[in-house]
């Protein structure tokens, strides 16, 4: 009689294939809003691909997310490195389609001593990370989403993008640009079934906001902000 190989049945406790998990990609995942949002999204059946620049803090966030049942992959990448960023995004999407891309990485600087102008290096760094980094992040995955006719892109802007904040001129400009970029993306991608969500937080307790010495009206914790953001993402608002 012919013989056939015995194929073991999947154990009920065996982790599902990454292609069956709901996959989120999140930049700026090592601290602040990004770290809190990663922990908020973490759950069984969820795959998190986290990008950050601080390896130690990123590893701590990943461990906390795994403890909540998520499958977590991490990469230490500066979003200004477009080649590495795009290569990693392609690798993540090939292993399992990305459902939600969250472009969250951002920095601020502010005015110089005695309210002098921002330094040239600070201006360029904010534009390259906050704006160009967000666009490069989207461009690394958007064509795959368009081919599938599904997905969601989330851009993190700021209230400073609605009304420029005198202490942070370049930061305000980059966040206004991110908002306009998101609005344009929505018109382009909606016919292809892709949702675009623009988040507009105010002051959130984080290492970045701690460097701001002025008033912080209506400041909230990163955890509270993450809960609000997660609800908006789930509703595809």
Image (cartoon, grey):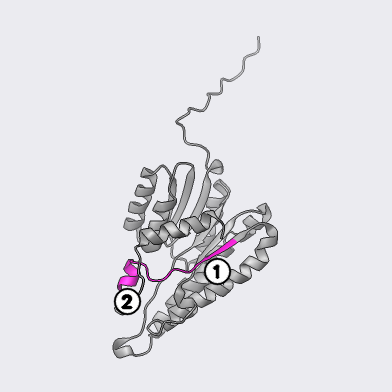
Q: Does 211 appear in magenta?
A: yes
Q: Is residue 201 above or below residue 73?
A: below
Could you say whether the residue bearing mark 2 is in a helix, strand or loop?
loop
User: How far across and down, in percent of the image, does residue 25 sit?
Assistant: 50, 55
Question: Is residue 69 or residue 71 the one in the foreground?
Answer: 69
Of marks 2 and 1, the one in the foreground: 2
In the picture, measured across the screen, residue 123 lies left or right of residue 153, that is: left
Q: Is residue 29 visible?
A: no
Question: Decide: marks 2, 1 in contact (CB < 8 A)?
Answer: no
Question: Is residue 88 or residue 154 the one in the foreground?
Answer: 154
**Mark 2–mark 1 distance (CA, rounded to whole Å):** 26 Å
Q: Residues within 10 Å of mark 2 (few under 14, many from 20)?
A: some
Residue at 34 percent of width and 90 percent of height = 116
Mark 2 and mark 1 lie on one chain; the one further toward the N terminus is 1
Residue at 44 percent of width and 78 percent of height = 171
User: How far across and down, in percent of the image, does residue 213 sit?
Assistant: 29, 78
- What range is drawn magenta here? 196-212
Q: Is residue 113 above or below residue 139?
A: below
Question: Is residue 177 or residue 28 the one in the foreground?
Answer: 177
**Can you identify the residue that label 2 sits on?**
212
**Can you identify the residue that label 1 sits on?**
135
In the picture, measured across the screen, residue 115 lies left or right of residue 46, that is: left
């Amino acid at each position: 009689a012919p013989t056939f190989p015995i194929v073991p049945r999947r154990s009920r406790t065996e982790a599902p294939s990454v292609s069956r998990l709901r996959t989120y990609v999140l930049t700026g995942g090592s601290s602040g809003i990004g770290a809190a949002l990663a922990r908020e999204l973490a759950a069984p059946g969820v795959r998190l691909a986290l990008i950050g620049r601080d390896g130690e803090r990123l590893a701590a966030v990943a461990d906390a997310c795994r403890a909540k049942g998520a499958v977590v992959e991490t990469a230490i990448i500066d979003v200004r490195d477009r080649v590495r960023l795009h290569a990693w995004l392609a690798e993540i999407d090939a292993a399992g389609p990305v459902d939600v891309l969250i472009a969250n990485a951002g920095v601020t600087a502010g005015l110089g001593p005695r309210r002098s102008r921002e330094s040239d290096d600070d201006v360029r760094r904010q534009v390259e990370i906050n704006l160009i980094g967000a666009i490069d992040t989207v461009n690394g995955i958007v064509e795959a989403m368009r081919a599938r006719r599904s997905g969601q892109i989330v851009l993190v802007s700021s209230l400073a993008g609605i009304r420029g904040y005198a202490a942070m001129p370049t930061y305000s400009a980059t966040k206004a640009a991110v908002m306009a970029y998101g609005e344009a993306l929505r018109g382009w991608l909606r016919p292809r079934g892709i949702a675009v969500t623009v988040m507009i937080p105010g002051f959130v307790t984080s290492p970045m906001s701690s460097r701001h010495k002025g008033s912080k009206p209506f400041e909230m914790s990163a955890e509270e902000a993450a809960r609000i953001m997660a609800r908006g993402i789930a509703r595809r608002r």
